[in-house]
Amino acid sequence: MIPSLILCPKCKNPLTESVLNRPELTPCPVCAAPLWVEVFPALFRRTAAGRDGEAVLVADEATCFYHPQKKAVLPCEGCGRFLCALCDCELHGQHFCPACLEVGRKKRKIKSLENERTLYDSIALALAVAPLLIFYLTFITAPAALFVAFRYWNAPRSIVHRSRIRLVLAIIFASLQIVGWAVAIYFIATRRKSHG
Amino acid sequence: MAEKEYQRLTRARPRSRFSVISSGNSSLWLGKDHVLCIDTNGYNESYKRFYFRDIQALVIRKTDRHKWWGLIFVVLALGFFLPAAISSEVVIKYIFGSIAGFLVLLLLINLALGPASACQIRTAVQIEDLPSLNRMRRARKVLERLRPLVVAAQGELRPEEIPLRLQELSTSAPGTMPSTSDTSSYVIEDPNTPPRTL
């Protein structure tokens, strides 16, 4: 029995090969937890060593923008700067310099680097609906919901397909609340006038 | 109509095991070349991508969670059913009876969903829990859907190959594995700027 690199999620002991890629649930040899472990060739793949930049030998040779003593191997597809092998960051077949990658991540230009999004549509809907329980709060939250809905109408929503229905509902609810407040204020004002 | 970039694999499930008021949900989506795990708290989403070429293993463990939930539902249902059966008050009969009925419905749903599971995905740099795969049936379905995609990206691994590959790994000398911490020729002073060569 050869221990593998996979640990049992329950007892944390290395699983033997007898448990791997079996068609049915197989008990862990140590804790007998029923497991179904599917391993793929990447488990046995060795990590490729990183490349160092090649030193410039001829004076007129193109050099890396960041390392003038290193030979340029390709241009960055974001900014066009020449890069050595060390500075070349490959992403889905495209080559970027580290600065462009960072900018792409921060400005959300490279979608596959995005690891977080704020759901403004959910925030707007929550602002419009949640305070209904404490009605007085809607005096503040309804305009806030409208502001968020209009301000972030074009902001990216969830990375998976999502319609603008939450924003639309937020606008409808918030508008109704504002109208309600306006009517209430009007009636109070007119009643005071008539009493006065 | 444009094709959607992601297809849903699982619905959002609570990340925490005992969360009644959920602190966060997790769902799985299938992309062109990766599985996307979305963790959301309702107002913010964070994404984890597991590329097919990087997935090393999927581990599914059958758990007893469904049995415990079943037991809880049975006890609670009996707890509400008995006063409803004994009481002569019609109002109590209706209230307690309907609560007991609701708990029986939850019990039936729990039974219909089948055995519970806990699932992990492993890559070279992380082991991530997949809380949305909390039932064996769903986990199997997802695995059946993912397997051909991972095989297409990495190649087939036959069961008889596994002992040989493991043997190779265990016998390979420690020096043959490339070290990821070898930074002798350059230094990274700031992760946001390019490395500086020495």
Image (cartoon, coloured by chain):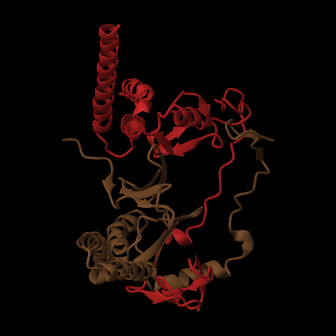
Q: Is residue A36 above or below residue A87?
A: below
Q: Is residue A112 above or below residue B107?
A: above
Which residue is drawn at the image coordinates 53% and 37% (left, top)? A105
Q: Can you see residue A36?
A: no
Q: Which chain is red?
A: A
Which residue is most to the left? B1
Quarter location, residue A54:
top right
Residue B39 coordinates in the image, percent (x, y): 47, 53
Which residue is drawn at the image coordinates 30% and 11% (left, top)? A190
A167 or A153: nearer the viewer: A167
Residue B110 is left or right of residue B24, and the answer is left
Q: Is residue A46 above or below residue B37?
A: below
Q: What hue does chain B carry in this figure?
A: brown
Which residue is drawn at the image coordinates 27% and 82% (left, top)? B85
Residue B193 coordinates in the image, percent (x, y): 69, 35
Which quadrant, please, contains the N terminus of chain A? Answer: bottom right
Which quadrant, please, contains the C terminus of chain A? Answer: top left
Q: Is residue A176 above or below residue B50?
A: above
Residue B191 coordinates in the image, percent (x, y): 69, 41
Residue A40 coordinates in the image, percent (x, y): 47, 72
